[in-house]
Amino acid sequence: MSTAAAKQQDPNDSQPLWREAELRAADAMGRLMEFWGFRRHMGRLWTILYLSPEPMTTTELSETLQLSSSAVSLSLGELVHWGAVRKTWRPGERKDFYQAESSVWKLLRRVYERRELNLIREAIDAFGDAQRHLDETRSQLGREDRRRVDYMHKRLSRLSALSKAGERLVRLVVAGRMINPADLQSAEEED
Amino acid sequence: MSTAAAKQQDPNDSQPLWREAELRAADAMGRLMEFWGFRRHMGRLWTILYLSPEPMTTTELSETLQLSSSAVSLSLGELVHWGAVRKTWRPGERKDFYQAESSVWKLLRRVYERRELNLIREAIDAFGDAQRHLDETRSQLGREDRRRVDYMHKRLSRLSALSKAGERLVRLVVAGRMINPADLQSAEEED
DNA sequence: ACGTCTGTTCAAGAAAATTTGAACAAACTG
DNA sequence: CAGTTTGTTCAAATTTTCTTGAACAGACGT
């Protein structure tokens, strides 16, 4: 089988002819993923798997991307954790095989659900805490300072409203429903 | 004026009572911004300005957040560059004053337009390049390898289609139009 | 024109992250 | 059960990113 031809320890040259193209795409996806807050390698590994018709082993992956086995193990583990890669099994084979979850849309939703929503919720909480904190100190302040604190309070309300609108939008995305970004706009117009 | 009372070199204690709340909110926004690929400090600085009824000077900012003047200069400069903060001017005063652009919606759009769109376009290009590269090598390959390369080619087409759908969605967001995330879904269904 | 006040840039230092090799553990083979 | 093979974890080392203080440059007032 032709993929077996790729397995050679000779550093250069012994690569299949399509390796260059493969790495180029993997790198582009790596950039996207990195920008999106994941490890570069996660994008790279996922892409290699996504472009491969057959499931691959960690050894093949580390050879393709020139990564140490620990690096592969770490990032691949994280990909599995996110459901972006599945472990598969082959009768007779001892090593694990991995294949990419190929529905990008499904992956996007999962990440938004697990990660972005949490992030927004934390921000919402923090804004609420800040407001409560202001409420507590308000009584100890003079007239001038109260005006100041009231101003901050109003602004924090706006940040909260915005964050909540954001949360709703992300929820809709996760549900695969249509969304209207202008909701964010209106969230800051009630002054 | 009460904000003047904050100006004291005494490290602790001399802070206005609302400082705690202010920093809490600033930090939450810092996290959001960091997650979104900006410097932590950008979010913090913007928030302090957003919560202040009056424009502020770099000195006040560095005192509030306990930052060196160079750190303030750097991140504030970037905020100005992104249009998130405006330099204002006060007759008689020598220092520059800064105030937050308070339309978050406007800011979001600008960032998506300038940054995310570029990122996606680069990825689209890279996938295209990879495909072209495959086309060039195809003739030198045997039957088995051609099948392999054809598979990769098809997958790259799907990644391209997805990226292009993403680009369209972001464009719509920037235009403030309704969007249907399910477009991404359908982008990978034509097999 | 001089001295002072502001803001920016830069190189050095500090902090944070990624990466690796080696040690460990677990599963399988004969 | 001893010896492999495979996968994970960990601390050390490397790389990258942030932060800072000092040097620099520009603007202003006198």
Image (tube, coloured by chain):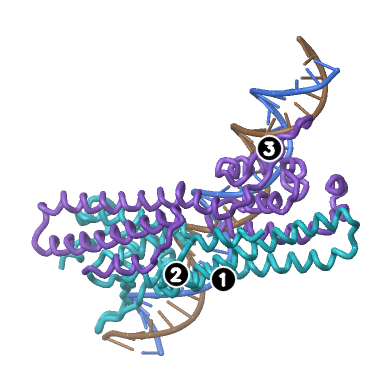
Chain colours: A cyan, B purple, C brown, D blue
User: Mark 3 highlights which residue?
Assistant: B88
Q: Tag on residue B94?
A: none
**In the picture, residue A86 is in which quadrant?**
bottom left
Label 3, residues with CA under 10 Å away: few <14, some 14-19, many ≥20:
few
Give the residue type that dot 1 points to: Asn
Give the residue type that dot 2 points to: Val
User: What residue is shown at x 59% (from left), y 68% (from top)?
Assistant: A164
Of A22 and B121, the residue lying toward us: B121
Q: Tag on residue A173?
A: 2
Q: Nearer the viewer, mark 1 or mark 3?
A: 3
Output the chain of dot 1.
A
Question: Residue A71: image x %, image y %?
Answer: 43, 63
User: What residue is shown at x 32% (from left), y 52% (from top)?
Assistant: B124
Output the chain of dot 3.
B
Output the chain of dot 2.
A
Q: Vertical placement of B143 versus B108: above or below?
A: below
Question: Residue B130: image x %, image y %?
Answer: 25, 52
Whether marks 1 and 3 lie on the same chain:
no
Q: Vertical placement of A25 versus D26: above or below?
A: below
